[in-house]
Amino acid sequence: MLVVQQIEVFFQHVIQVLKGVSLTVPPGQIVCVLGANGAGKSTTLKAISGLLAAEDGRVTDGLIEFDGKRIDNRLAHDVAGMGITQVFEGRRVLEHLTVDENLRAGNLGGTRGMQSKLEQVYSIFPHLKSLRKKAAGWLSGGEQQMLVIGRAIMADPRLLLLDEPSLGLAPLLVKEIFATIERINREFSTAILLVEQNAARALEIASYAYVMENGRIVMDGEAQVVKENPDIKEFYLGLGEFGTRKSYKDVKHYKRRKRWL
Amino acid sequence: MLFLQYLVAGVLTGGLYGLIGLGIVIIYKSTKVFNFAVGALMTFCALVCVALVTNVGLPFWLALPISLAFAAFLGLLTERVGLRPLLAQPILTLIMATLAIESILYGTMLLFWEGYTISFPQGVLPGQTIFLGPIFIPHEFLYAFIVATACFVLVGVFFFKTQMGLRMRVTAESHVVAMALGINITRIFAMSWMLATVVGALAGIFIGNRLGLQVAITPSLAFKALPAIIFGGLDSLAGAIIGGLTVGILEKMAAGYIDPKVAEITPYIILLLVLLIRPQGLFGEERIERI
Amino acid sequence: MWRPCGVIDETYEQDLAIVRTFPQWTLTVAALGALALLPAYVSGVTLNTVNHIAITIVALHGVNILTGLTGQITLGQAAFMAIGAYSMEMMVRYWGLSFWIATPIAMLITGVAGVIIGLPSLRIKGFYLAMATLAAQFIVPWIIVNVRPDLTGGTDGLTVSPPSIGGLQLTSQESIFYLCATVAVFSTVFARNIARSRYGRAFIAIRDNDIAAEIMGIAVVRYKLLSFFLCSLYAGLAGCLYAIWMRGISVEHFTLHESIWYLGMLIVGGMGSVVGVILGAIMIRSLTILVTYIGPWIAVFLPPGTGTVLELGLGPIVFGVVVLAFLIYEPHGLARIWERFKAFYRLWPYSY
């Protein structure tokens, strides 16, 4: 459904952030992108959703196709209209608007079907319903995360781009959020491109995984395969050679070389 | 009794300030641009309306919608030519852009209308000054006040009850989120400029009815609306009308009790005081900061 | 500051010099010489314009320090000029001081007024500050007209008698030219030195990020007010020159539009650049003169009777269009174009 081929992204014509990134998201599947800070994960998402222009960035090479149509460097609202919705990192709720208004704003079309969509979101996040008249800025972190995901569902996307939904949330909430992501994927058969730092959880729900470093995809494969890779275990899952939790006591002072570099 | 008279006069003038302020707030809310050209835009549209009545000979009820349509067009043009290329530029650039537009409009008006005082023919608005006991109410201001109130209600309904209004508020909140939600923000910008200019043109037409229009003077009347909106809070619709009324009443009180000359600068003194004491205004949105 | 390749400072004196290379010295001396001989070649009308440009440059240096370097937007430069002009004339008229003594005092008065108007800048930024200075732009003329009209002449203004130096009355455009040109040259040197001193760097730090500047140990309050003070100092000086150039003062000379024009000239010239100040002032002032020449040509195509209005209206239109064009296409102004030209001729014919 979504095909990203060898894209290169420059900011302000000089700073190269992506150096040939390729990935595919098949319909109805969860694909995750792992990687450290600054690897270019968020930039990849922005390149897809067309929000690079707002930061003076451009896709200079390669192409992005959605359902066979080129969408690289298209305007963000056109891309959103085609069924790709991005959920930002860091819970960008519309602070001064109420929960209800936040959700309504997510609806792309007119007011038709608004009520049923609202009910749908409230059935997924029953907790939000009790907060519907509250200004979104005053919600807790977990509630805000639910709100932005709910807002994205309002748009009825066929592809959902999720940028670090677990950032800064308590482990219990993280679990809940990931369960919801799986549920959305199951119930609406929405394809999901998930960018995460929490590799263990992401690999559990994803069917395919990519690993990014320094603006390149350095590894990809079925989630199960990636999970078993010793390097991934070491650097992303924090597990020792035998699958036991690694203790900081044993960490050597030199860094183990990653084999893919 | 005199107090009541000043109060009534203040409320009526304040309605006009509120209307002008509303035009500024609409633009500021969705685009974060402060429109210094509002006075020139308003005067221009009002002058067009006068020209339609006196030179073309149209009846007022026909000239009014035509000039409002012209206002919408002018707003659209301003946004397209002047501000669209300057999206997301620093504040000084945006201020200077609206000032440059103000200058262009000012020059154009001088070309066509020179420096004379131009006003609508007598009796364009039906009715005459109303006397309530010792208090008199100029009917033009009464009309203006009613229209201003209607505008506030309509704009309020638009912003808070319709999907389009919601989109405008989303755009005001965050441009990036709005784009990601499939909102065409450039269209929102154009819409808010059109809406704001129409509201401003209404104010200009009422000013033209009561006081007459003068190219060199009328635009600066709009600057008196600045304290009104700063007082009320730059992004608050309710603030615009309450600020407008407050400034109008204080101005008339100053004129009545101190000296009519003092009234000229009362709004600016209020402006300075508000800026010094409470810059975000009475109803301005404070940043919600949760830690 | 960019320097061409191969120009190397070997001593501290060289490092501190404004004019550093031999060609620069030649050009400077030639330019000053040409300036000195200018009255011999051009007519009184042109000289009149040149004087206006010189006065504008002085006022614009002030705006540049406040807006270009410190980033505080001012819409009140004309009001400051009015304060300077009126306080000078009133001291001359009622206290019998000579122009040469009254002017520095008037500058100081303007500076203090500037600091007072600048007080809100400690709490507010951006267009809020623009509005505070806008309020000043309306309040100052009102005070001049209404508080003591018997002293200030009210709306009629005052006539200014020409000052004399060593028995020579500065009545002719030539003599005023020498005064204005000298002041303009010295204020340019002074402005240049401020820009590259510790004060200038503090101003720029405040412009770029006032919180970061404060953390770096710059006393933001003091430097903001200092910036307002310097800006008004220049405004006061320009106001005094304006008074003797016009031979009279009235609040109608110091309008909001005048203040807007100063900001516009700064945009056209290039924010924060001393060269830009000079280029911007020359460009906008000459354009308005040009318009008065072109006006009658265009008037031929218009219905009769619009000719005189054309000159009035065309000025603001051209000004607005030029400023808008610079904002969109060259936000760094003429100064950047000049830099590019210099880079071009240094490298020509071998670019790279």
Image: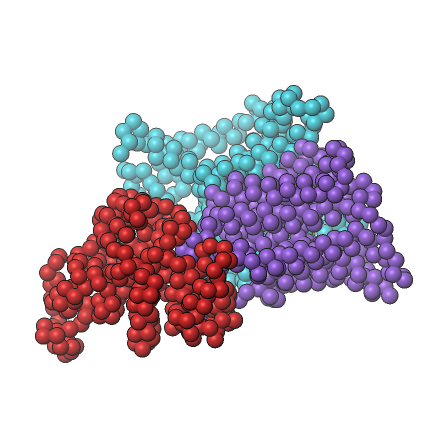
- Give the colour scheme of this rendering: by chain
| Whether residue C236 is visible | no
- In the image, residue B33 sits, relative to residue A96, either above or below, namely above
- Residue C271 spot, x, y in % from top left: 47, 45
The front one of A102 and B40 is A102
Along the line of sight, the residue nearer the viewer: C211 or B255: B255
Colour chosen for chain A: red
Instruction: Tell me which chain appears purple.
Output: B
How far from the left and from the top, in percent, is residue B175?
A: 45, 55
Instruction: Depth check: give the residue in front, C35 or A68.
Output: A68
- Residue at the image point whose x is 18% and y is 72% from the top: A238
Give percent across and percent down for residue A79: 37, 50
Q: Residue at x 49, y 58 (%)?
A: A112
Report x, y in % for residue C296.
64, 23
**Foreground pick, C91 / A228:** A228
In the rendered structure, the answer to whether residue A84 lies left or right of residue B86 reads left
Rendered-image quadrant of the C terminus of chain C: top left
Indicate the colour of chain C.
cyan
Q: Is residue A196 above or below residue A1?
A: below
> Could you tell me which residue is drawn at 12 percent across and 74 percent down?
A243
- Residue C20, by quadrant, is top left
